[in-house]
Amino acid sequence: MESFDIVTLTVNPALDKSSHFRGLIPEQKIRCETPRYDAGGGGINVSKAIARLGGVSKAIFTSGGASGAMLKELIGKENIPFEAIEIHSWTRESFVAVDDNTNLQYRFGFKGAEVNAAEKEQIVQIIQNLRCKYLVFSGSLNEGLPSDFYKQMAEITKKSGIKLIVDTYGEPMSRVLEAGVYMIKPNVGELAKLIGVEHLEIGEVSEAAKEIIAKGGAEIVAVSLGPQGAVLVTKDAFEFVPAPNVVKRSTVGAGDSMVGGMVWALSQNKSLKEVIRWGVACGSAATMNEGTQLFKGEDAKRLFEWLKDK
């Protein structure tokens, strides 16, 4: 069996569509341009980001119906090794549309495909048999999966010595911290909720992250600060990287790109400063492209070099 240092799990992937139109008018047909299709969902986007940096990961995801078949086809075209878990429900779709009259972007998402008990057990079996160095859980949970599903999977991976990186939100994130993971990637608002406060100032982020670390929730907390950049916090270290000033066309997939850059850097034994720098470079590069395209490798590398002097 082929082994991989990095594996990503996406239980709730999406077939992403993006397009352009002119003028959002109620009660009238909105004529859209020919859509672009991309394979989407947290872990899949992380694997795509890793591939664009020249790395290799295995993407594990659920797939159902015609949309699931197209998802597999798109991932295959990106030459990303994958394992699809067939489910009875159709893979969800998402739609991103830009109004060329205003340059405003509209994002439409749908609920995830339902996962039944037998399909859930398939996911559990795959995780139990995994042997890798880094495992990424990214994205939301489907209907049919309990809010502590990631926690259950984390407890399995700890027995195998796998370093688990989690990027989700709400109760699934709160619950997985009970098991303890290697790294999490919240934004400032999500971090505030994790420690039970309504709001955090930038200067309070480090202490909030250390509170999670002190309780055994995570060894590394990487926090996205939006246009301000990002910080990476451990028990003994604090690293801040400012965001480069780029022309933003879309924020879709920027967080996933950030995670992909960081996981790739970790797999290359980079320093923590370089890890968060690669994360910011990839996340910022993703905002330079329209719709659901993520980033170009050359853009991420150019931004990384620029950040080395900051």
Image (spheres, rainbow, N blue to C red):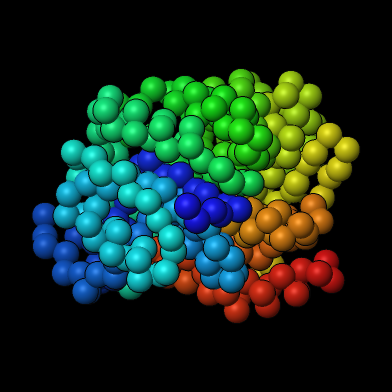
Q: Where is 234 relative to 109, above or below?
A: above
Horizontal side, residue 305 vs residue 285: left or right: right
Residue at point 42%, 38% (across, down): 126
How many numbered markers are drawn?
A: 0
Residue at point 54%, 53% (across, down): 3
Task: Residue 114: give x, y in percent of width and height.
Answer: 25, 33
Q: Quadrant of residue 235?
A: top right
Residue at point 29%, 58% (across, down): 71
Of residues 286 and 82, the one nearer the viewer is 82
Look at the image and tell me in which quarter the C terminus lies.
bottom right
Task: Residue 289: give x, y in percent of width and height.
Answer: 47, 71
Task: Residue 83: give x, y in percent of width and height.
Answer: 37, 51
Asked if residue 121 shows in the view, the reply is yes
Of residues 89 and 192, the one nearer the viewer is 89
Q: Quadrant of residue 121?
A: top left
Of residues 241 and 123, the one nearer the viewer is 123
Q: Residue furthest front?
A: 1
Q: Where is 193 relative to 290, above or below?
A: above
Horizontal side, residue 273 vs residue 262: left or right: right
Horizontal side, residue 133 vs residue 93: left or right: right
Task: Residue 48: give x, y in percent of width and height.
Answer: 48, 62
Horizontal side, residue 271 vs residue 76: left or right: right
Residue at point 19%, 60% (across, down): 25
Asked if residue 280 shows in the view, the reply is no
Q: Where is 265 relative to 219, above or below?
A: below
